[in-house]
Image (tube, grey):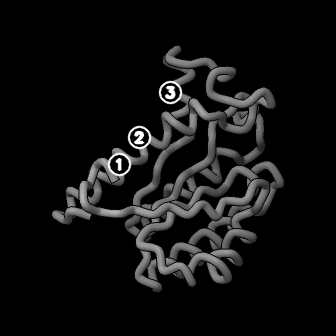
């Protein structure tokens, strides 16, 4: 709202921890479409990777969800998986990240590369994982959500302005 005075943006968080992309796809049909949102930020992948969901099934689910949202006239951006110390030991983690990028490219939609951003923040020494993650060393904390929210808001603002719209 501060970035676009006179406009009233409303945010609804339909995230549910621990869900697979297939669970989220069901909720797109049952919960999200009825809201007729302008934009959906779809954060997914980490639970699929941890639980070893077949990567091609993940691709099909992700593509189906994106197609459903686009067909309803809803803009969609993907938010890829978080970086956490054990992520690099999860078999296939990079494959899920790659698939998210490939789907975003094929569908010509933006992807917010949360994994790369978080990894950079840690590897560059700007933050430690204990500063960015909850005590379980997996879930994000308020600091990391704040950093990522600011970057995501910048990206959304840039997209809106590049389209020549005021919101």
In the picture provided, is 156 more to the left or to the right than 129?
left
Q: Are marks 1 and 3 in contact (CB under 8 Å)?
A: no
Which of the labelled discs sits on residue 155, or is there none?
1
Vertical comparison of 132 with 152: above or below: above
N-terminal-most mark, 1 or 3: 3
N-terminal-most mark, 3 or 2: 3
Vertical comparison of 124 with 112: above or below: above
Q: Quadrant of the C terminus?
A: bottom left
Q: Secondary structure at mark 3?
A: helix
Q: Quadrant of the N terminus?
A: bottom left
Horizontal and vertical percent position of residue 163? 21, 64
In the picture provided, is 102 more to the left or to the right than 159?
right
Residue appearing at x 54%, y 81% in the figure = 68
Say few, some or many: other residues with alpha carbon within 10 Å of mark 1 (under 14 / 14 to 19 / 20 or more).
some
Q: Are marks 1 and 2 in contact (CB under 8 Å)?
A: yes
Horizontal and vertical percent position of residue 77? 46, 61
Distance between the Cα atoms at labels 1 and 2? 6 Å
- Residue receiving disc 2: 151
Which of the labelled discs sits on residue 19, or is there none?
none
Q: Are marks 3 and 2 in contact (CB under 8 Å)?
A: no
Distance between the Cα atoms at labels 3 and 2? 13 Å
Distance between the Cα atoms at labels 1 and 3? 17 Å
- Residue receiving disc 3: 120
Horizontal and vertical percent position of residue 79? 53, 53
């Amino acid at each position: 709202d501060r970035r676009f005075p006179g406009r009233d943006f409303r945010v609804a968080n339909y995230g549910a921890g621990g869900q697979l992309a297939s669970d989220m796809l069901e909720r797109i049909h049952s919960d999200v479409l009825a809201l007729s949102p302008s934009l959906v930020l779809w954060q997914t992948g980490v639970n699929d990777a941890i639980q070893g969901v077949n990567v091609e099934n993940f691709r099909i689910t992700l593509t189906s969800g994106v197609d459903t949202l686009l067909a309803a006239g809803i803009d969609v951006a993907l938010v890829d998986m978080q970086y956490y110390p054990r992520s690099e030991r999860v078999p296939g983690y990079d494959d899920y990240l790659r698939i998210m990028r490939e789907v975003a490219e094929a569908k010509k939609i933006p992807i917010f590369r949360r994994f790369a951003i978080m990894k950079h923040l840690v590897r560059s020494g700007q933050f430690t994982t204990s500063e960015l993650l909850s005590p379980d060393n997996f879930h994000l904390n308020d600091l990391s959500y704040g950093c990522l929210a600011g970057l995501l808001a910048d990206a959304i603002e840039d997209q809106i302005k590049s389209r020549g719209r005021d919101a």
